[in-house]
Amino acid sequence: MALDTYAALQTSIADFLNRSDLTAIIPDFISLAEAEMNRRIRMAALVKRADATVDSEYTSFPSDLQQIKSLYLKTSPIIKLVFLTTEEMAAKKASGYKTTGNPDYFSIIGTTFQVLPAPDANVTAELIYHSKINALSDTNTSNDVLVQNPDVYLYTALKQSAPYLQDDQRITTWATLSEKAFDDIEIADSRAEFSGGDLKTFARAY
């Protein structure tokens, strides 16, 4: 059986655990696995782009954003904004940096990105970012991570089952296989990056 759908994943988890009484809880194992995967997985299939109109100091970013790779102003010429930490941004503002014109810097605050200076006219920005995983459900039966890396879904969900099952002695096995799957994804993603490219990413603030 191909392990590429939500239903197939649930069946496989039950088979690996050799339990037929976990139908109601297995979706929770998968949700917990996805939470861990969102924190750890960065892969080409999850990279997206989005345009946003920047018309003030603060602009909301997409709800599925997990980590920013880069932010550009679609001006002529195109401007790549420089990332600053919130502390660096505050210091830059306090230093009397220019207050008009196209933004030069950005920072991340909560679910928004802050630019400096605030634009004196609307400008379109292009955001390149790592998105969250499109969570599996009965209506969203598959996604790119499951299709490309079914092992990370399976073994991470099995690892999440351990606290519920309590006496399952296979936790070390599930954890080891899960870690290997995460490592393999990281290696594959690193190889996929263009040589000489800008690998710096910017974590969202919580």
Image (tube, grey):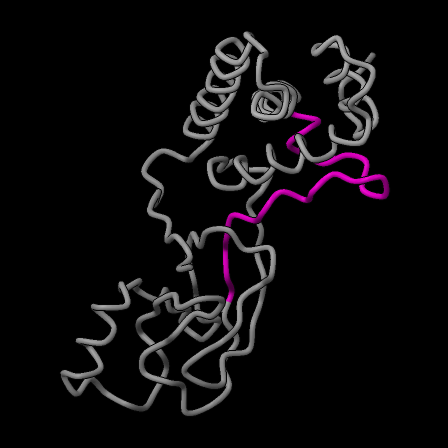
Q: Which residues are magenta?
A: 126-148
> Horizontally, is 100 left or right of 129 in the view?
left
Q: Could you tell me which quadrant the N terminus lies in?
A: top right
Residue at 21% x, 68% y is: 88
Residue at 58% x, 20% y is: 162
Q: Number of callouts in the render?
A: 0
Q: Quadrant of residue 11?
A: top right
In the image as oriented, which residue stretches furthest toward the left? 95
Give the answer, above or below, for where 46 lies relative to 121.
Answer: above
Residue nearest the observer in this picture, 69 or 160: 160
Residue at 45% x, 85% y is: 56
| Residue 18 x %, y % | 75, 8
Give the answer, above or below, for where 89 lies relative to 121.
Answer: above
| Residue 21 x %, y % | 81, 19
> Horizontally, is 93 left or right of 79 in the view?
left
Residue nearest the observer in this picture, 110 or 29: 29
Give the answer, above or below, for where 172 lies relative to 89.
Answer: above
| Residue 14 x %, y % | 76, 16
